[in-house]
Image (cartoon, rainbow, N blue to C red):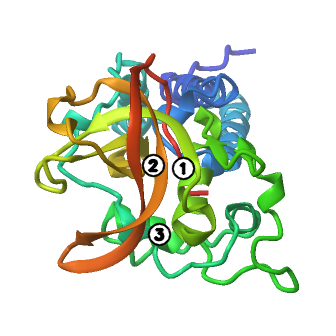
Amino acid sequence: MPAKAFNPQIFLEFLCYCVFGGLIFYLVSSEKYLTYVTPRLKPYLYFTSIVMGVWALTALGRLFRPQHKLRSAHCFVLVIPIVLLLLPHAPVSASNLSGNYIGGSAFSNRSGQSALSMQNDLSITIEDASSPEDKVQAEIIQEPLAGLPAGAYVSELPGLDMGNKRITVAHEDFSMWLTEMYTNIEKYQGYTVVMTGFVFNDPEFLKEDEFVPARLMMSCCVGDLAPAGILCKYDQADQLQAESWVTVEGTLTLGQHEYDGVLSDEPQIRVTKITPAEAVEGYIYPY
């Protein structure tokens, strides 16, 4: 009985399926995929990994099937992303970005809604979004949950001390509180706010006495990262080192700021105390 001919093309395809699928599975299970995309893509990445596994098993059945003409160029469709994912990547900083800033206009027109209620029922229609601000607007629902009064979840917000009128924003709650403060400005006026972020003081967007203790917000992928945070009023803001990490404490007030020629109400912090802080890894997401 003649020996079956080994098919190198199928073997190369098998290797590509295995490596790509295994790499995707590793990135998701280790949560390193968050360097590139948002958490909501996690099930799709797992699905991709499973599909690669099925294709690899299918390729095994054809490994010894003769083929007259061998081709391998199509394998670069997987080889190129594999190489790109394996290359070392430095963390993205605000200086690497193209001058975008997610300000108050991204959180307008949702007064009275709770951040927790918005997180429970999120719209992700972003096909028409052309900027990070537009994507944030597209991803946060425009109506509160049916049958629930405005502010129904306020007592459940982590870090909220209503008795002492104090809000301590933990790293994992940064995005939620950012939304809550913008959508319920009047409710929290006069509260003491403590939050940590890197100093964003780009003169293109801010005045000399303004800065933002910001975090990088990702709407879809690393390509749309932009600084986001609460604008702070501080007499010595121009002396703060850009991108240095600080913990800010101050009083939340209702102020106005101009974004793209439009003057809008927004929460602002009158800073009373600034202390150096350790850098926080990872990004925040608008949901």
Q: Quadrant of residue 174?
A: top right
Residue beneath disc 3: 107
- The image shows residue 204, relative to residue 71, as above or below, that is below
Q: Which residue is mark 1?
A: 285
Residue at image mark 2: 218
The residue positioned 49% from the left and 54% from the top of the image is 252
- Whole-number angstrom distance, CA of label 3 to CA of label 2: 15 Å
- The answer to which of 108 and 138 lies nearer the viewer is 108
Q: What is the three-letter code of the residue carrying label 2?
A: Met
Q: Earlier in the sequence, mark 3 or mark 2?
A: 3
Q: Is residue 119 above or below residue 2?
A: below
Which tag, 2 or 1, sits closer to the chain's start?
2
Q: Image point 83% across, 53% down: which residue? A: 156
Residue 183 horizontal/vertical position (percent): 57, 70
Q: Picture quarter containing residue 245?
A: top left
Instruction: Single out the residue that lies furthest toward the right.
Output: 147
In the rendered structure, are the residues bearing label 3 and label 2 in contact, judged by CB atoms less than 8 Å apart?
Answer: no
In the image, which is nearer the foreground, mark 3 or mark 2? 3
Give neighbour class at mark 1: few <14, some 14-19, many 20+ (Cα, 10 Å): some
CB within 8 Å, label 2 to label 1: yes
Classify the position of the C terminus by image quarter: bottom right
Whether residue 72 is visible, yes or no, is no
- Seen in the picture, residue 218 relative to 148 is either above or below; the reply is above
- Measure the C-alpha gap from mark 2 to mark 1: 5 Å
SS for callout 3: helix
**Kind of residue at disc 3:** Phe
Residue 111: x, y in percent? Answer: 58, 79
The residue under the point 18% across, 48% down is 98
Quadrant location of the N terminus?
top right
